Amino acid sequence: MDKKDINYYQTFITVSPDCPAKEGIVPPLRKGGATKSRIEYDLLSSQPYTYTQKDLIFEVYIRHKLIPEEELQARGNQIREELFQKSQACLRASMLPKKYGWGLHFDRAGKIALYGVESSEYQRYFLNEGNELKLLPAMRNSRLRPKTSNIIDE
């Protein structure tokens, strides 16, 4: 049993304030296989409102690490437990809303769906007219640099 609930509920993660995408873009495949963001995209776009954040993190982990089905059958619970013994980045840090233009909607059950920033659904969740959702921006791609002062200490 999972000890800590890291899922979001009734939440919409908006694209990062410095996201370069003006519409939802499918993350590219790499020579070595699918990136984590591509795996997230494939899972969420083909099965909206199926995964919670915690389930998605685990599924992405096993697919990215290419853990064989036999090992999952034998040690799946142990692998999951070991994974969540360490802190995991939440989906606010995912490249989907940071770089590729996807908003993430979490329903009452904590299940996730993707919406491109150009879509009417994205705009509806972003406007949050009924004030039913918690709106969270994705993390920025770059840190804001502090302004340097031109004052010289005397």
Image (cartoon, grey):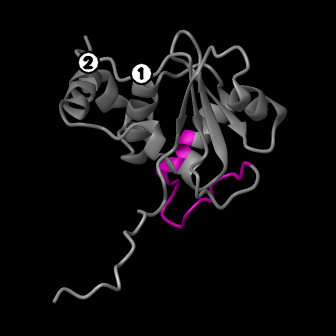
Task: Determine whether the residue tagged by mark 1 lies in a helix, strand or loop.
Answer: loop
The residue that disc 1 covers is 7
Which residue extends farthest front? 154
Q: Nearer the viewer, residue 136 or 104?
A: 136
Disc on res. 99: none
Magenta residue check for 59: no
Q: Residue at x 30, y 84 (%)?
A: 151
Image quarter hosting the N terminus: top left
Task: Determine whether the residue tagged by mark 2 lies in a helix, strand or loop.
Answer: loop
Q: Is residue 38 visible?
A: no
**In the image, is residue 94 above or below residue 128?**
below
Q: Give me the C-alpha separation between circle 2 and circle 1.
A: 9 Å
Q: Position of residue 8 (x, y in %)?
A: 46, 22
Q: Position of residue 138 (x, y in %)?
A: 51, 44
On screen, residue 71 versus residue 116, left or right, reads: left
Q: Position of residue 69 (x, y in %)?
A: 39, 31
In terms of secondary structure, what is the magenta stretch mainly?
loop
The residue that disc 2 covers is 4
On screen, residue 100 versus residue 24, left or right, reads: left
**In the image, is residue 3 above or below residue 153?**
above
Of the residues shown, which amino acid type is indicated by label 2? Lys
Q: Position of residue 67 (x, y in %)?
A: 35, 40
Magenta residue check for 39: yes
**In the image, is residue 130 above or below residue 43?**
above
In which image quadrant can residue 66 be found? top left
Q: Which residues are magenta?
A: 24-40
Which residue extends farthest right? 120
On screen, residue 24 versus residue 119, left or right, reads: left
Of the residues shown, which amino acid type is indicated by label 1? Asn
* Label 1 Cα neighbours within 10 Å, binned few <14 / some 14-19 / many ≥20: some
